[in-house]
Amino acid sequence: MFQLAAVPRLSRSTVDREEPARTDPARLAKLWATGRVVLVDRKGRTPVRADASELSTRPTAGDLPPEAMLLGELDGVGYWALTSDEELEENVSSPDRSWGLWTGATSEDGEEWHDLRTTGALLSDTAAGLFTTAVALASWHRRASFCANCGAPVERVHAGWATHCTGCGREEYPRTDPAVICLVHDDDGENGSSVLLARQPIWPPGRYSVLAGFVEAGESLEACVAREISEEVGIDVHAIRYLGSQPWPFPRSIMVGFTALAVDRDAPLIPADGEIEEARWVTRAEVLAAFAEEQPDLKLPGETSIAYQMIKGWAEA
């Protein structure tokens, strides 16, 4: 049975995320004094080096600010995230131009800032893990400025990994919304000979991927897979099997990857109105041709997405 082609690009992380450090003032002070800072702007972009393989981090300075978020420690260096309000010049071409949905920007000194979705596959393991965590924490804090219980303002505690309500004292922690993403194939052989791909109306022409959707309250991951496939394209699946997962902090998801078999390969595909523009069965040969850029009418997800590793793993099985 096939597996993911490789570790999903945003699942890579090398820093120590030891939780006790977040509540140890002496340890935090030391990690800040010799640390590096990852800046994140309001659109979730950060400055990157010319080849986008590493982040352009900043040295820490002054006292530890209350808004600083500890990302982890590596080789005695503490890595932190801070949000940035620096004015940037927009609409700079991104390193990964395949989607065309997210552009970069430049600062006054010419430094380029880019989105995690367009750099995640290019970054080193350490850089990818730092950027993913920084975007996730910054995104959560932007949406959690007030207490969900009493509405009072909150303050950051535990080095950015929790908030404390100034009114009722309630503590809140970063939220993660689980979403399933599933590669459906037929039953021709162990791994099938065709895969079910679909496209959303907002995607660039020719772009296709596997199906995905959010887990509902009181629903198991496997039940969500079966429901989402049925709702989005109108077919039933079985033999649902876990493949792997990847954080997707846009704004706060984790993508849980599965594969499943179509009950009836010949059943009519019924795309969900307004959500799925088109769904189609694609052969392994066509998928391999698309990866080789020899199938102009079939463009697959970029390497930053777990969908890439799912489709590639299936195609090469």
Image: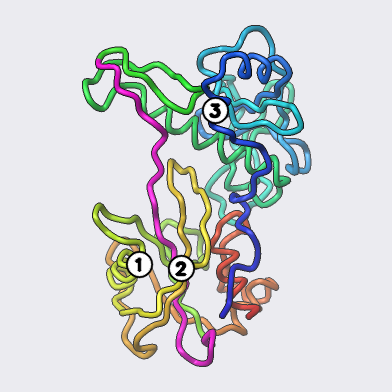
- In the rendered structure, which disc, 2 or 1, sits on the residue that comes first in sequence? 1
* Residue 100 % position (x, y): 56, 51
Q: Which residue is mark 2?
A: 258
What amino acid is labelled 1 in the image?
A: Glu
| Mark 1 → mark 3, Cα distance in angstroms | 34 Å
38 shown above or below 276: above
Mark 3 nearby-residue class (10 Å; few <14, some 14–19, many ≥20) = few
Residue 185 located within the stretch drawn in magenta: yes
Q: Secondary structure at mark 2?
A: strand
* Residue 45 % position (x, y): 58, 34
Query: Circles 2 and 1: CB distance less than 8 Å?
Result: yes
Residue 175 located within the stretch drawn in magenta: yes
Query: Circles 2 and 3: CB distance less than 8 Å?
Result: no
Q: Secondary structure at mark 3?
A: helix
Question: For residue 303, what is the image quadrant?
Answer: bottom right
Q: Is residue 54 left or right of residue 197?
A: right
Residue extending furthest left?
150
Q: Which residue is mark 1?
A: 222
Q: Residue at x 36, y 80 (%)?
A: 238
Q: Is residue 313 left or right of residue 185?
A: right
* Residue 144 % position (x, y): 36, 27
Q: Residue at x 56, y 12 (%)?
A: 65
| Mark 2 → mark 3, Cα distance in angstroms | 33 Å
Q: Residue at x 62, y 76 (%)?
A: 295
| Mark 2 → mark 1, Cα distance in angstroms | 8 Å
- The stretch of residues the image draws in magenta is 168-193
- In the rendered structure, which disc, 1 or 3, sits on the residue that comes first in sequence? 3
What amino acid is labelled 3 in the image?
A: Pro
What amino acid is labelled 2 in the image?
A: Phe
Q: Tell me the number on the disc at residue 20.
A: 3
Mark 1 nearby-residue class (10 Å; few <14, some 14–19, many ≥20) = some
Quadrant where the C terminus is found in the figure: bottom right
